[in-house]
Image: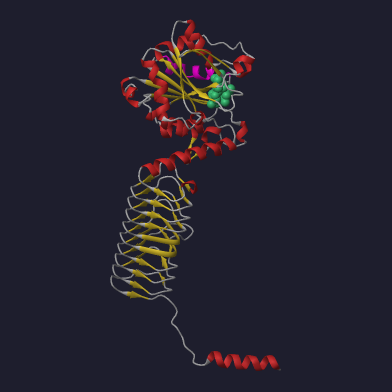
């Protein structure tokens, strides 16, 4: 289906019901499964972002008892999401009905998604909704399973979906079917509650199966259809191995998007992005670079190998690394250079500034064309407070200097190598804050002769 045949998502109201009441015991974790992250965003966060992008106008999140943490995370992404608590885990149909108040408002479309199935794309959600506009009451998401064991099987007649049979309830013949239920479902809002209320728990697991919605819809004279997507789209996460698989898949997508949009990735499989990494045109990323959340890199910048960036803004034509660490609040100006073993935090670096080697800049502002020598440290912390260092444009900081904040280095000033600067330096001045050099002629020769003689005694 091409996007031109999809209904305009904004013309129909759409409730997304996000099932996030998973037990997640196989994660062996102190935190709920759906708060585990891929590409630095929680799984429930990915799913919520996808439903919003697919045109959801209301969001209901079904959480387990005492799961304020999940509710809080959901509200971070969708502030007006309604939270419903499913007190007992009686099955997927029961979970959806926990959001009864939202269902009862009869939105045009209802989409049901699982918070532990984080790779579902916006296109897939749009495909799932599309048949509702053409009159179908239930749409299921099918996929050809490599191994269908455990999944519900789609029972089709032509393009009509007749029923979904859960693995445990299926006959041998039904188990031979490889077209499986991905779990996600779309329901027409005006028909949904009447269908869902008819679901019972007379089956092998004594659960209220959402999947029974298909046969019930048919018995009420409604149409039900399936749309088929790639298995990757419905990859569910139950344990840490599946979490790592999800990470691998999402990184694959992010790398692809970056390259398609004009970024050179020399060895894409070694570069790790966050869900929100933004990269301009003709950016080059060398092998083994990690992007934490909140990084923007503008056009023509180069990120050399083994650099780690988080919460940083890199302007055009800047160069970072190799072996650089940019922490939150680092802002690197156009054509500035940050070299090896340099850490920068909460610091603005002006255009053309150079910080080549072995330096820590924290809570600083550095003017244009400043040169920071190797081994420079801003001493920004005294164990209690953080203090700022301000360096004016064109200043030159000699190697191995400590700038004890709060301190200001004026425009065009020089700081001699090895200085400990505790007082502000005026514009265009030279400041030396180090021991004076002493020369003792012939001292070393006399020392050697004396010492050798003493040893021979
Ligand atoms: C479900 C489908 C199956 C499909 C499979 C795809 C049903 C009956 N079966 O089976 O056809 O092939 O997904 O992965 O729907 N949940 C709750 N509350 C509950 C039960 C489940 O919130 O009471 C949530 C879970 O956290 C999970 C999702 O619903 O996110 C699916 O539940 P799960 O028990 O894993 O369903 P499956 O047996 O895998
Ligand atoms: Ca499951």
Give coordinates of residue 98: x percent, y percent.
50, 18
Front residue of this view, candidates 87 and 325: 325
Task: State which quadrant residue 172 falls in.
Answer: top right
Give coordinates of residue 75: x percent, y percent.
43, 32
Q: Residue furthest right?
A: 457
Quadrant showing the C terminus: bottom right
Whether residue 450 is situated above or below residue 350 in the rendered picture: below
Give coordinates of residue 104: x percent, y percent.
42, 14
Query: How are the residues colored?
Result: secondary structure
Res 86 visible: no
Task: State which quadrant residue 174 falls in.
Answer: top right
At 56% from the left and 92% from the top, the residue drawn is: 445
**How many dots with numbers?**
0
Give coordinates of residue 437: x percent, y percent.
45, 83
Q: Quadrant of ligand 2?
A: top right
At 58% from the left and 91% from the top, the residue drawn is: 447
At 35% from the left and 26% from the top, the residue drawn is: 3
Res 152 visible: yes
What span is colored magenta in the figure?
Answer: 90-104
Quadrant showing the N terminus: top left
Residue 168 magenta-highlighted: no
Front residue of this view, candidates 135 and 95: 135
At 56% from the left and 10% from the top, the residue drawn is: 200
Whether residue 74 is situated above or below residue 368 in the rendered picture: above
Residue 99 magenta-highlighted: yes
Left or right: where 352 falls relative to 44: left
Front residue of this view, candidates 79 and 5: 5
Q: Main secondary structure of the magenta part?
A: helix
């Amino acid at each position: 289906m091409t996007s031109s045949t999809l209904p305009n998502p904004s013309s129909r109201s759409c409730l997304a019901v996000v099932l996030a009441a998973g037990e997640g015991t196989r994660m062996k974790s102190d935190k709920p499964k759906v708060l585990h992250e891929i590409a630095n965003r929680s799984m429930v966060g990915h799913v919520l972002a996808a439903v919003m992008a697919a045109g959801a106008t209301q969001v209901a999140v079904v959480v387990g008892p005492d799961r304020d943490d999940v509710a809080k995370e959901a509200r971070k992404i969708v502030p007006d999401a309604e939270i419903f608590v499913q007190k007992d885990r009686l099955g997927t149909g029961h979970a959806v009905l926990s959001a009864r108040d939202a269902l009862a408002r009869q939105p045009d479309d209802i989409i049901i998604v699982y918070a532990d199935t984080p790779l579902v794309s916006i296109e897939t959600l749009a495909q799932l909704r599309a048949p509702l506009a053409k009159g179908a009451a239930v749409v299921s998401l099918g996929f050809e399973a490599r191994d269908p064991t455990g999944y519900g099987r789609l029972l089709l007649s032509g393009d009509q979906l007749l029923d979904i049979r859960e693995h445990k309830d299926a006959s041998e013949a039904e188990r031979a079917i490889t077209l499986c239920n991905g779990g996600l479902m779309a329901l027409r809002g005006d028909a949904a509650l009447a269908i869902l209320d008819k679901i019972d728990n007379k089956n092998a697991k004594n659960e209220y199966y959402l999947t029974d919605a298909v046969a019930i819809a048919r018995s009420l004279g409604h149409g039900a259809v399936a749309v088929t997507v790639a298995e990757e789209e419905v990859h569910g996460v139950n344990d840490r191995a599946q979490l790592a698989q999800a990470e691998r898949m999402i990184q694959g997508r992010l790398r692809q998007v970056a390259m398609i949009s004009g970024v050179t990735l020399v060895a894409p499989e070694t570069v790790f992005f966050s869900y929100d990494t933004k990269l301009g045109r003709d950016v080059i990323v060398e092998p083994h670079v990690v992007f934490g959340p909140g990084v923007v890199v503008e056009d023509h910048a180069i990120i050399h190998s083994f650099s780690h960036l988080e919460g940083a803004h890199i302007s055009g034509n800047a160069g970072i690394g190799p072996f650089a660490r940019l922490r939150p609040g680092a802002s690197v100006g156009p054509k500035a250079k940050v070299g090896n073993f340099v850490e920068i935090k909460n610091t603005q670096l002006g255009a053309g500034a150079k910080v080549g080697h072995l330096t820590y800049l924290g809570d600083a502002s550095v003017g244009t064309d400043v040169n920071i020598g190797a081994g420079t440290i801003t001493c920004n912390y005294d164990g209690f407070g953080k203090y700022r260092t301000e360096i004016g444009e064109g200043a030159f900081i000699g190697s191995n200097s400590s700038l004890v904040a709060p301190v200001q280095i004026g425009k065009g000033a020089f700081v001699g190598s090895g200085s400990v600067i505790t007082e502000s330096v005026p514009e265009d001045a030279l400041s030396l804050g180090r021991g004076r050099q002493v020369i003792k002629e012939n001292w070393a020769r006399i020392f050697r002769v004396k010492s050798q003689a003493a040893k021979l005694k």
